[in-house]
Amino acid sequence: MRKTIHEIRDPIHVFIKIDDDERSILDSRAFQRLRHIHQLAMTYLVYPGATHRRFEHSLGVMELAGRVFDVITHPEHVTDTIRNTLRPLRGANSDELAYWRRVVRLAALCHDMGHLPFSHAAEKELLPDEWSHEQLTRTILEDTEIETILKRTRPTIRQEDIVKLAIGRKEAKDLEFTDWEEILSEIIV
């Protein structure tokens, strides 16, 4: 099945190419709410140009995470020691690397879904005790809307892989991380 590639105009990257799966996440209610969440809280009240939102930020993070993945997995950048240590880099399993590239991009796209209005400034006031925006991100990623989107992907992207990479080991202490997953989560977190 061939995926359609869409282009989104972004003032920094000019055009960001996204596939159907990324577009489905982008069109979800959980992601669309980021259009209304300021990246820099109330800084725009002091600096009128500081108006970008988590929506645009997440698109840029997805694009740059994909570029970083391409650089760190390019054969000329991988030493024999690293290749022998990290299973996905062994051999020429392009399907496995393609899977993880998709996971990195989707996790990067979703990494800020749990942010609230006014960004970090209001987390303590708006979230229950002991909660963070990362925990809220995880809750949203485990919601049925996102779960349904991920189940439609081919090959199917595991929801747990998105959660791990989007929020990292520090915020997902109950999940087991391979060395590979930990490295990929560092691209985002």
Image (cartoon, rainbow, N blue to C red):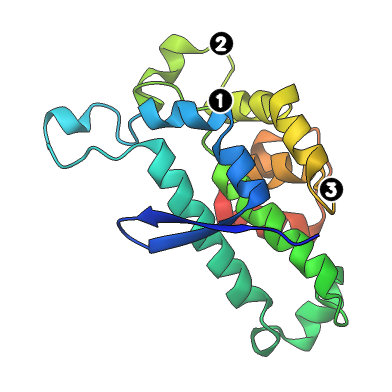
**Image height check: is 25 above or below 7?**
above
Identify the residue at image location x=23%, y=26%: 42
Residue 135 at x, y percent in the picture: 63, 26
Mark closer to the observer (2, 3) = 3
Q: Amino acid at mark 3?
A: Thr
In terms of image quadrants, where is residue 141? top right
Residue 18 at x, y percent in the picture: 56, 56
Q: In the depicted view, which residue is nearer to us: 99 or 181?
A: 99
C-alpha separation, residue under disc 2 versus residue under disc 3: 35 Å
In the picture, measured across the screen, residue 71 lies left or right of residue 47, that is right
Residue tagged by mark 1? 29
Identify the residue at image location x=75%, y=62%: 2
Give whichever of discs 2 and 1 has the lower sequence position: 1
Residue 183's disc number = none
In terms of image quadrants, where is residue 98? bottom right
- Camera sees residue 143: no
Residue tagged by mark 2? 129
C-alpha separation, residue under disc 2 versus residue under disc 1: 26 Å
At mark 3, the secondary structure is loop
At mark 2, the secondary structure is loop
Counting other residues with Cα less than 10 Å from the Cα at mark 1, is it few (<14), some (14-19), or many (20 or more)? few
Q: Amino acid at mark 1?
A: Arg
Residue 83 at x, y percent in the picture: 80, 80
Residue 156's disc number = 3
Q: Quadrant of the N terminus?
A: bottom right
